[in-house]
């Protein structure tokens, strides 16, 4: 307690700095891979991706992320042993933020799409083992995280593959693909608005004092889907046949129909990511602020002040703008060749899986889902359409993330304990 009263301001400043660094890492890696499909397919530019992320990541975090975040990431560690030594929890959270941020920076510089969720989980485990003991870690939850390495990409890939098959049957394999694309386009846009709205409403918007019944949720989601479809229909109507482009590539005009639709999926993906990952990335910062302001009280949950959300949003946009292009290249170009139709399927599949996961509370990774979805659309054209070497490197980076975060966090924890203790 004495340490908190003596060094509280210094620890708070460090928390804000490390938190900003962490959200910069989220932008450079997690948001970059969330936007990679849209940029890689040529549907939107990097500048447009940054603008979409700035608006919809914040909207997702604020509207659907909740104003309360679990202090201990998804119940990974038990803080009970630290009730009488709250300063140790502060050192641990600072160490976890710094460790996860450094690993995200290394991965982003290499163009590896790793998981923010798993970076912070690994860092928390490292601190808990070093600072409290093996018993403080909920190893069952860690087992779920490891299982999600398989479940997340498989689910994302399966939904993307099914969407791709539906587009092939309903549009590409018809007598007039361009006409069919314009006819079915609004339906696919409706799907974007409907699915993301529905799962967001199911998840509950308690902090906005909105608790709708199942029937009301379906009605509101359908209304939002129809509005989005109407806007999409107006945008699609302006697309004209490009006969010159069709000579070079038979489906060039069809792909042009899907280009405006990719704007909707990019917005949906940013919103889904914001609702699932942004608040969690700044959860340790909220925990530190809560402990310092309460004079050392350790709570399982802590309020997420608006200024922390704003800090998170700003850090994400800067991260995406400065280093995000490397991860975007990996997701958008290196795994498989993306076109607007393939990008649409991958992004909608990823957004759907993310919002479903945030509803069920599974500790999934947006990154793993996005990569799985891109592999899914590649598989629609056969295994030969995928770059196995790139996928192999990505999988290795996933396996390294948990231990890398854990080792770094343990080192930083002992350093901070030595400096302030």
Image (spheres, rainbow, N blue to C red):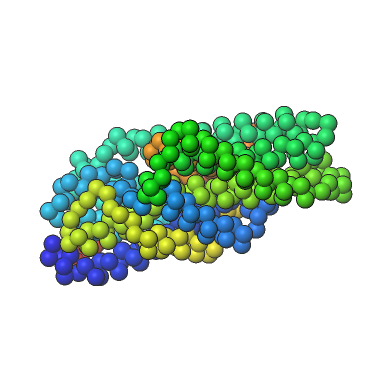
Residue under the image location 60 percent in, 38 percent down: 191
Where the N terminus falls, by quadrant? bottom left
Where the C terminus falls, by quadrant? bottom left
Residue 126, position as x, y percentages in the image:
28, 49
Closest to the observer: 400 or 368?
368
Residue under the image location 41 percent in, 45 percent down: 210
In which quarter of the view is residue 340 placed? top right
Residue 66 horizontal side relative to residue 295, left or right:
right
Q: Is residue 360 visible?
A: yes
Residue 132, position as x, y percentages in the image:
19, 48
Residue 38, position as x, y percentages in the image:
62, 50
- In the image, residue 297 sits, relative to residue 380, either above or below, namely below
Closest to the observer: 158 or 146?
158
- In the image, residue 411 sits, relative to residue 16, either above or below, namely above
Residue 97 horizontal side relative to residue 343, left or right:
left
Residue 128, position as x, y percentages in the image:
24, 48
């Amino acid at each position: 307690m004495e340490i908190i009263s003596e060094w509280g301001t210094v620890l708070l400043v460090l928390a804000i700095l490390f938190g900003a660094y962490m959200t910069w890492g989220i932008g450079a890696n997690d948001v970059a891979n969330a936007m990679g499909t849209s940029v890689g397919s040529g549907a939107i530019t990097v500048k447009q991706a940054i603008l979409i992320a700035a608006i919809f990541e914040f909207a997702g975090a604020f509207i659907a992320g909740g104003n309360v975040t679990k202090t201990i990431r998804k119940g990974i560690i038990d803080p009970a042993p630290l009730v009488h030594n709250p300063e140790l929890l502060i050192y641990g959270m600072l160490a976890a933020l710094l460790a996860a941020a450094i690993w995200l920076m290394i991965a982003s510089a290499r163009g590896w799409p790793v998981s923010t969720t798993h970076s912070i989980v690994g860092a928390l485990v490292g601190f808990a083992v070093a600072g409290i003991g093996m018993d403080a870690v909920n190893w069952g939850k860690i087992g779920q995280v490891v299982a999600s390495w398989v479940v997340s990409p498989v689910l994302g890939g399966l939904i993307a593959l099914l969407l791709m098959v539906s587009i092939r049957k309903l549009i590409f394999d018809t007598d007039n693909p361009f006409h069919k694309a314009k006819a079915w386009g609004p339906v696919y846009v409706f799907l974007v608005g409907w699915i993301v709205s529905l799962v967001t409403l199911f998840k509950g918007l308690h902090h906005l004092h909105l608790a709708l019944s199942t029937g009301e949720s379906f009605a509101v989601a359908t209304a939002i889907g129809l509005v989005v479809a109407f806007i999409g229909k107006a945008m699609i109507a302006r697309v004209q046949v490009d006969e010159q482009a069709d000579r070079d590539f038979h489906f060039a005009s069809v792909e042009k129909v899907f280009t405006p639709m990719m704007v909707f999926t990019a917005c949906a993906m940013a919103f889904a990511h914001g609702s699932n990952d942004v608040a969690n990335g700044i959860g340790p910062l909220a925990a530190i602020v809560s402990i310092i302001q309460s004079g050392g009280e350790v709570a399982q949950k802590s309020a997420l002040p608006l200024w922390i959300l704003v800090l998170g949003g700003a850090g994400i946009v800067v991260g995406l703008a400065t280093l995000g292009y490397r991860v975007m290249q990996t997701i958008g170009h290196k795994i498989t060749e993306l076109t607007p139709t393939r990008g649409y399927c991958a992004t909608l599949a990823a957004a759907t899986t993310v919002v479903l996961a945030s509803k069920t509370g599974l500790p999934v990774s947006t990154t793993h889902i996005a990569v799985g979805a891109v592999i899914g659309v590649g598989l629609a054209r056969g295994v030969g359409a995928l770059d196995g070497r790139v996928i192999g490197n990505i999988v290795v980076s996933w396996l390294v993330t948990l231990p890398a975060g854990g080792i770094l966090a343990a080192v930083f924890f002992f350093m901070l304990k030595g400096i302030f203790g």
